[in-house]
Image (spheres, helix red, strand yellow):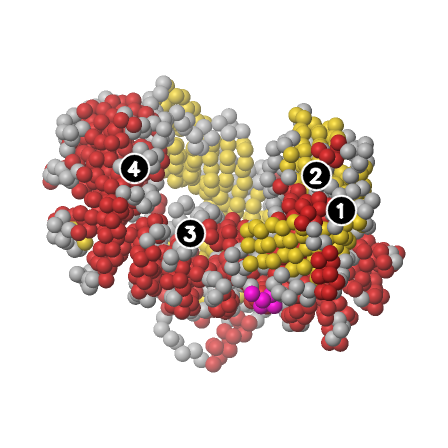
Amino acid sequence: MIGGLFIYNHKGEVLISRVYRDDIGGPLNGVMILLDAFRVNVIHARQQVRSPVTNIARTSFLHVKRSNIWLAAATKQNVNATMVFEFLYKMCDVMAAYFGKISEENVKNNFVLIYELLDEILDFGYPQNSETGALKTFITQQGIKSQTKEEQSQITSQVTGQIGWRREGIKYRRNELFLDVLESVNLLMSPQGQVLSAHVSGRVVMKSYLSGMPECKFGMNDKIVIDKQGKGGGSEDVAKSGKQSIAIDDCTFHQCVRLSKFDTERSISFIPPDGDYELMRYRTTKDIILPFRVIPLVREVGRTRLEVKVVIKSNFKSSLLAQKIEVRIPTPLTTSGVQLICMKGKAKYKASENAIVWKVKRMAGMKESQISAEIELLPTNDKKKWARPPISMNFEVPFAPSGLKVRYLKVFEPKLNYSDHDVIKWVRYIGRSGIYETRC
Amino acid sequence: MPAVSKGDGMRGLAVFISDIRNCKSKEAEIKRINKELANIRSKFKGDKALDGYSKKKYVCKLLFIFLLGHDIDFGHMEAVNLLSSNKYTEKQIGYLFISVLVNSNSELIRLINNAIKNDLSSRNPTFMCLALHCIANVGSREMAEAFASEIPRILVAGDTMDSVKQSAALCLLRLYKTSPDLVLMGEWTSRVVHLLNDQHMGVVTAAISLITCLSQKNPDEFKTCVSLAVSRLSRIVSSASTDLQDYTYYFVPAPWLSCKLLRLLQCYPPPEDGAVKGRLVECLETILNKAQEPPKSKKVQHSNAKNAILFEAISLIIHYDSEPNLLVRACNQLGQFLQHRETNLRYLALESMCTLASSEFSHEAVKTHIETVINALKTERDVSVRQRAADLLYAMCDRSNAKQIVAEMLSYLETADYSIREEMVLKVAILAEKYAVDYSWYVDTILNLIRIAGDYVSEEVWYRVIQIVINRDDVQGYAAKTVFEALQAPACHENMVKVGGYILGEFGNLIAGDPRSSPLVQFNLLHSKFHLCSVPTRALLLSAYIKFINLFPETKATIQEVLRCDSQIRNSDVELQQRAVEYLKLSSIASTDVLATVLEEMPPFPERESSILAKLKKKKGPGAVSVPDLEDGKREGGELNGGGERGPDSAAMSASNASTPSPSADLLGMRSAAPMSAAPTSAGSLLVDVFSEAGPAAPSAAVNDDGFLRFVCKNNGVLFENQLLQIGIKSEYRQNLGRMYLFYGNKTSVQFASFTTTVSCPGELQSHILSILRLNVQTKPVEPVVEGGAQIQQVLNIECLTDFSEAPLLNIKFRYGGALQNLSLKLPVTINKFFQPTEMTSHDFFQRWKQLSQPQQEAQKIFKANHSMDTEVLKAKLLGLGTALLDDVDPNPENYVCAGVIQTKGQQVGCLLRLEPNGQAQMYRLTLRCSKDSVSLRLCELLAQQF
């Protein structure tokens, strides 16, 4: 149970403060003291606070940070921390859906709206319906629109009904559906090219413009499903899909997915909300396709010089193009000058970040490129050895590194007369780098 | 100093700082700093030469970055280069960087020292000052090694500028504080002292700090400074406020210098030279007078400066503690401050008064402010001021106002701040004990204390109330009644339950007559609290129950039922289970006689320093409780303990129980009665802690008889204790026979090897060993090995053949870690142990008194009281002697009259004793008449040391 929710700017000034329970703070200006305690102990802490949960004066603060804005939930009770964080993330999504980027300016401009939202999505500290689509039907940024009785009762029945995320009577001329598979791949590799840890965390994000109350069914190359079908189906099918199926370590679904059906049949069926939503989140650790390989070469020449050579190799079909490639090579803290030569793209020494940043706009699969740098060092009397932080990399590729494939997405709407074939479906795969590091 | 010219503004630095200040977030700040660091690194790269200005600018930036909390690991060399510059600003920045950033083990230190040396030997006073400041700021041992010999020379040289002298004095002070062994004054001493006469006030001010510090270490060498300081002080004090020009601060002439002078004088006793003393007293009087004058300015600085001098003067007066007139005036002055608007002044006044209260001259004067202080305790808004007020109340308390003060403190306790509660509780407990005129008041106060602030009542406090109740017969009934009433409250503190359990277990019988507090009611009341208490308290309650069985046989069935129930007899706590099992068996097996012996009333506790006082001392650190207080506490504590001399020492007793289950096991000693379990349980150690105090470490093999005298009037206790060994004694005498149990406890964890003890009768005893054996002492040998932490027992059988005066000697030899330890002790066997009390009427007494009228038969001694002359204490001691104390015999009720017969094998010696105390003179007259003249003499000798 969240006791209160607060939004701070980077200076620690409180932009939004909503208290749900009296147990935090206590009488008089207790809440003010508490608010200040968070500022002093977390935002302006001498040492940067890395834990998202801080306990101050027997009150737990759970915070997330979006650019320069801090969202903090305070509670005196032993709450489920993951629930609170889920809520905070959801809160961010809702705010983003209403006014775009979460910035100090936007928060200040929309404070009435935010208070209205906070009243709606939290009740006595318990999270309520936080579905953007549903919220948008009755919390609007336009002035007060006097709703008819009918509309009001419709809203009530929808919010309190079984399918709280979709209202009835939606009509589109074109029934369209967009499905994005977004993945981020994380890697830690030793200098010799040994994978120390790697995992992919992915999301299936959908945007649906469908009429009526359609029933959808989503299928992908999940190993368990394929194996099950393989037993019943022909041997050809097994041979074909055996390689391509993936093992999903864990996954979570949007509330619209019927979990009972997933548990018994492993099929994902749901009535989708209208507009944007995240259908599922998953994580895989096996058989990951690593889109890039980084090969570092670091040579220390005497006390005052360092030679660095980094080769990157793209490791996917040559017909595909990777984008927004960025390699970040950390430099020692005693660097006094850097000379760079790179075959492709642009490279620059960024003193403010103590790193060489090499950017390549595009790169096809099965190619390689390299950069070499000469770093001059200032001799110091300190015998501290340079810790050699890992080389990190950013990129975007048009496939799913986990190997996930969408097999089908069927839409049934028995009441209205459009069939699965009439729906226009768009599928897109985007693989991004998470923490993609190679030690040197 | 040369002014910083406009061109030296270092624009780059200003831009950098403003950039940092404008950063929106921490990340942005770090980015900006990284960028700047990279820039500086590229500038400092070896291949280009930088001019002094840029070097200074970049070193400044580095310094700023360092002060923001980032590590700097380059630029030191550039900073050292700056030191050799001729420009003031560059040199200054160089020194600044070095004093902030260079650590002492840097390899650059040699270069730096060289630069400093150059500057010191230059004739430029500014450069010299910079170098001195750098030395003082670094203040490391290396600096001291390099320059400690140089600086005194600069300080006393005739041609040194005043400003340099000032810096040199302070620099030397700093070096002296870090490494006193390296700063050798010797030859410079007298010249440094004469700096007090310097023309320049700044030099005097700097020098006096140095002298104060030095004179604290070697007061004798700097003795001459007293007269110089006094004359300087009188010149300042008597000067008109305009005389000193630059050194007049808001109409007060040289306040800092005056304070420092007064503080210097506090290092020394009052000057012996009459003239100097007169002058000083005159000064102090002037200062006190000035405080009365109307202020010359309304500014707060004016009054601050004036009060600073005044308070320093008052502390000097208190330090001297020899001028009653000044002390009383100071006290009155402080009294005015007590009601001042300024909180700080009230605080300081209360603090100073605390020390004044301990002076005999001003104690009475302080007492007149009691109302104001009590008011301060109640109404002050600042907790620290309230704390001081409480301290002062404690300090000013004496017999006349104890009741009032204790009542006030008690009532304040209910609203007191948590931070000072524990201390307040201790103070109340001590005052209540120290000035208790009537013990029911004392018991009331302490029980109140437990009721109001139970959580803060430490163990020592409630142990103490039990000790006192046990030692005082007259208060036991009252205590039982009060405790019983207090326990009836629906919620009472655990400490109250502890006290209640103990006292009802011991003295419940005293109130059992009343049907409202019949045995069963008492038991039910106690048992109703049982389940709410912690394990140690439950253990104590179980002991109380078994005592109940002894006191009230009618409760036996009920209590056995309680003991038998599973929650006791199968308790998961070993201590509770063991007690339940043992007590249950004991109550069902033992006959009433045995039960009565085992569960006898606790014997009185021995006299010792109040454990509460010890606790307060520990809490506040030495010096916080003034010395007269302590002695007072000790004496009064003893007085309260009453006939403590008789009682066995609980620690020794319970220790003996651990290894030898004797029928008289002290069950209430809260020690596990398990045979052979030498390790004290947690509950057991509580009591042992309180009662044990480190015994004086006696030199080995020298006859040790300080323990001996303590045993004239008591039979049990600790005879001897050092780091290795503790010897406890338990003895009983009947007729002319005695049995003594000696307990040797090994306090170390290593075993004692070849442990042997021998008892010899020296002097006359030995010489007559064949012919006329006066005392027959038979010993049984002990085991030769005492394991670490273990205890062994030895039994001595004693028979008195005829009267004797020398005590037998106990010789102990053992090996501890290879070294042979040898110990000789006088065994406390004295003639009076064989006394049989005889009751007689006044008529009989005087008849016998007259019969023993031969001059040899009488022994008389007049002596000064060593201990307090409290009636109860005296009575207890006389009873402990073994004689009967006869009431209504002597026409003067102040006098004590005793009678007894000493039983020896051959004959009986009748003894009559008369003790006449003189309260005013603190003297006693002791008269003894015995049928045998040697006995009178010996008894007289023994007894004279007891009172």
Whether discs 1 and 4 lie on one chain: the answer is yes
**Residue ID at (85%, 56%):** B594
Where disc 4 sits, the SS reads: loop
Along the line of sight, which residue is nearer the eye, B750 or B868?
B868
Provide the residue designation for mark 2.
Answer: B806
**Callout 3 amino acid:** Val
Residue B409: percent from the left, percent from the top?
49, 66
Compared with residue B157, is residue B225 higher up or lower down, i.e. above or below? below
Between label 3 and label 1, give the one nearer the viewer.
1
Along the line of sight, which residue is nearer the eye, A393 or A322?
A393
User: Which chain contains the residue that carries disc 3?
Assistant: A
Count residues near mark 4 (Cα–Cα under 10 Å), then give few for <14, some for 14-19, many for 20+: some
How far is disc 1 from disc 2 in space, using C-alphas? Answer: 18 Å
Residue B840: percent from the left, percent from the top?
75, 62
Between label 3 and label 4, give the one nearer the viewer.
4
Where disc 1 sits, the SS reads: strand
First-in-chain label (1 vs 4) = 4
**Residue ID at (58%, 67%):** B438
Provide the residue designation for mark 1.
Answer: B731
> Is residue A346 toward the left or the right of residue A73 in the image?
left
Q: Main secondary structure of the magenta part?
A: helix
Whether discs 2 and 3 lie on one chain: the answer is no
Where disc 3 sits, the SS reads: helix
Q: CB of mark 2 within 8 Å of CB of mark 3?
A: no
Provide the residue designation for mark 4.
Answer: B223
